[in-house]
Image (cartoon, rainbow, N blue to C red):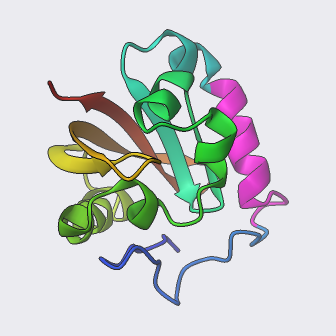
């Protein structure tokens, strides 16, 4: 079952627990495996990149963390992605794009949004949100650019 984001930054009650065991692996173990496998892309991308299995199972490259004013570890440990990283006016649209395109494994989508830095300031950004299946789990694979 895919996780469905609600516009308030939370996932629905029908979603998997972050520690749900599926095929012998937890979401945290899956995200560690993904991070290892995607390391060449993370290190060499000109964009900020992150992969998201859930608010407690995500990672990013250094470029993305810096774009949002975090260290990679701080970004990884942010509690609620939509509340911490996306302007409130754009949260519902961000969640809708995730639900329609990623959770449904439909197709990639590119869109602009106002991103929120750790210090509370905002910046215009664009993301390519790509649905990815990994060991029977839906993963949100993102490339993010700051717009000047």
> What is the x, y in percent for residue 60?
55, 35
Report the residue at 40% width, 73% height from top.
9
Q: From which residue to which does the magenta span run? A: 22-37
> What is the x, y in percent for residue 40?
59, 13
Secondary structure that dominates the magenta span: helix
Report the residue at 67% width, 33% height from top.
35
User: Residue 26 lies in magenta, yes or no?
Assistant: yes
> What is the x, y in percent for residue 120?
38, 53
Taking 74 as reference, is 38 above or below it? above
Q: Which of the pair 94/40 is nearer the observer?
A: 94
Report the residue at 29% width, 48% height from top.
115
Report the residue at 26% width, 39% height from top.
127
Residue lying furthest top in this view?
A: 44
Taking 61 as reference, is 1 above or below it? below
> What is the x, y in percent for residue 27?
71, 58
User: Residue 1 lies in magenta, yes or no?
Assistant: no
Residue lying furthest bottom in this view?
A: 13
């Amino acid at each position: 079952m895919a996780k469905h984001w609600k516009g308030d930054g939370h996932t629905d009650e029908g979603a998997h627990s972050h520690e749900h065991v599926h095929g012998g692996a937890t979401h945290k173990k899956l995200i560690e495996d993904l991070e290892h496998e995607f390391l060449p892309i993370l290190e060499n991308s000109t964009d900020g990149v992150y992969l998201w299995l859930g608010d407690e199972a995500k990672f990013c490259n250094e470029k993305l963390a810096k774009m949002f004013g975090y260290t990679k570890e701080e970004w990884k440990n942010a509690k609620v992605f939509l509340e911490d990283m996306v302007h409130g006016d754009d949260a519902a649209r961000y969640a809708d794009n995730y639900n329609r395109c990623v959770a449904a494994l439909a197709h990639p989508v590119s869109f602009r949004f106002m991103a929120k830095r750790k210090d509370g300031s905002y910046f215009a950004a664009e993301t390519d949100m790509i649905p990815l299946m990994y060991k029977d789990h839906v993963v949100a694979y993102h490339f993010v650019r700051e717009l000047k």
